[in-house]
Image (cartoon, rainbow, N blue to C red):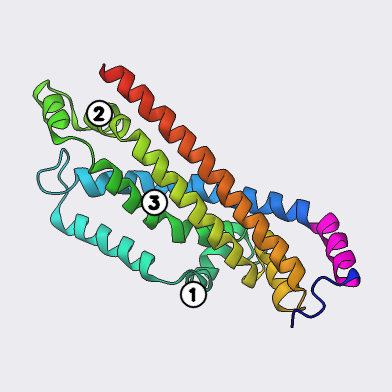
Amino acid sequence: MFKDLFSEEALSEAWRIIQAEFLTAIWETVYVTVLATVFAVLIGLPLGVLLVVGEKGGVLPLPKWMLKTLNVIINLLRSVPFLILMILVFPFTRFIVGTVVGTTASIVPLVVAAFPFVARLVESSLREVNPNTIEMAQSMGASPLQIIIKVMIPESVPSLISNATIAITTILGYSAMSGIIGGGGLGKIAINYGYYRYKYLIMIAAVILLIVLVQIFQSIGTKLSLKADKRLKKKSV
């Protein structure tokens, strides 16, 4: 299978394809990943906040049935494998974008798959906030909204950034799988050339670039998290 992997002909063809398609594929991958992460955070952040503040004894208790329904929906969406979820949301994708094929269309299932994950990450971050800090804000007469915006979220910024990094790298992996249903990016190239045409050198190059992108996102997220943590320490001194 790998007999002619590094033959002159294979290397020449791989270089031609890399020059012709990889730059666009990298842009499509970054575009889809970043945009899907932004929308997933916009939906998942408030849901994660509600999961914490809405429980019994929280700063903004919700009806038990509402909180239970929210947990069930999040757990249900998280339990569906991404490939199956992409197919299940075809009607919704077509309604939003007008098509189920292409780079932009892949953003919809990515957001649907990612926002429950983000909600759980946000929930985890907010639960790390010192309860004494929240009680102090309550004793000073702060409203639930003020506690959420001025206490809980600022105190958990380093953890939120770290979890956002986990989310964006996870979405990056999902974006590669979207190539199976016609999504663009490096995943499409890996599948079209590596799987369908047995051009394994192209597939290896696409995988290496995906790994590089993961490392870049991870490095940026780690640096931002450390900087945020230092700012909070300076404020507390």
Type of amino acid under label 3: Val
Q: Residues within 10 Å of mark 2 (few under 14, many from 20)?
A: some
- Residue 92, above or below 150: below
- Residue 115, above or below 192: above
State which quarter of the image contains the N terminus: bottom right
Find residue 93 and report its image quarter.
Answer: bottom right
At numbered mark 1, what does the secondary structure look like: helix, strand or loop?
Answer: helix
Q: Is residue 109 magenta?
A: no
Closer-to-camera residue (230/179): 230
Q: Is residue 42 left or right of residue 193?
A: left
Q: Mark 1 highlights which residue?
A: 84
Counting residues from the start of the chain, the first of labels 2 and 1 encountered is 1
Q: Residues within 10 Å of mark 1 (few under 14, many from 20)?
A: few
Q: Residues within 10 Å of mark 3 (few under 14, many from 20)?
A: many
Asked if the residue under mark 1 is in contact with the one under mark 2, i.e. CB atoms within 8 Å, the reply is: no
Counting residues from the start of the chain, the first of labels 3 and 2 encountered is 3
At numbered mark 2, what does the secondary structure look like: helix, strand or loop?
Answer: helix
Principal secondary structure, stretch drawn in magenta: helix
Type of amino acid under label 2: Val
Query: Could one spot residue 103 in this view of the protein?
Result: no
Q: Mark 2 highlights which residue?
A: 151
Q: Is residue 16 magenta?
A: yes
Callout count: 3
State which quarter of the image contains the C terminus: top left
Which residue: 30% across, 35% down?
A: 156
Q: Is residue 144 left or right of residue 90?
A: left
